[in-house]
Amino acid sequence: MTTQRAKGPFAVKLAPLAMEPGAVTGRMSIDKTFEGDLTGTSVGQMLAFQTADKTSGGYVAIEQVTGTLHGRRGAFFLQHFATMDRGAPSMNIIVVPGSGTGELEGLKGKLTIEIAAGGAHSYVLDYELP
């Protein structure tokens, strides 16, 4: 299989969700709209923790993306694992193996999020399809 690259901008809306009493983590809903080589939407949930000084923390998330990737229609799940260590970020976002449906069945890949100085978000998805 040959690795392909999809990229473009996306908009994200995060909204707080209810937590258990005494919880030390935050829980958010994720709603995204993708443009560019991947067009569509996603919905998901995030669990996050941030230190009091806001320089360190981490989050995990799962989101379901539904749309068209380079002309192929379907859906797939993304799994996020990210940390910040005294301001230094580390992020790993992968396509959940076996989660692709429709014309995206068999999709494998890794997504990178880029945030511009003004706050605009974009993605780069390096992927393989059978």
Image (cartoon, helix red, strand yellow):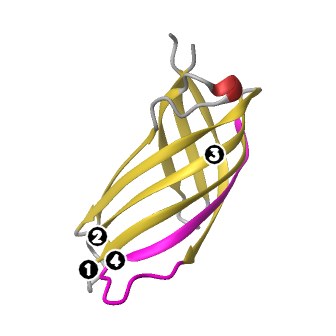
Q: Around disc 2, counting alpha carbons within 10 Å, would you say few (fewer than 14), some (14 to 19), or many (20 or more)?
A: some
Q: Which mark is residue 61?
A: none
x, y percent for residue 88: 27, 61
- The residue beneath circle 4 is 25
The residue range painted magenta reads 17-38
Gap in angstroms between the C-alphas marked 2 and 1: 6 Å
Q: Which mark is residue 51?
A: 1
Q: Around disc 3, counting alpha carbons within 10 Å, would you say few (fewer than 14), some (14 to 19), or many (20 or more)?
A: many
Residue type indicated by callout 2: Gly
Q: Earlier in the sequence, mark 4 or mark 3?
A: 4
Q: Compare residues 29 and 110 and report the one nearer the observer.
A: 29
Residue positioned 47% across, 44% down in the render:
112
Q: Earlier in the sequence, mark 2 or mark 3?
A: 2
Task: State the image quarter where residue 86 is shown.
Answer: bottom left
Please determine whether, in this image, residue 99 is positioned above or below residue 115: above
The C terminus is located in which quarter? top right
Q: Is residue 33 magenta?
A: yes
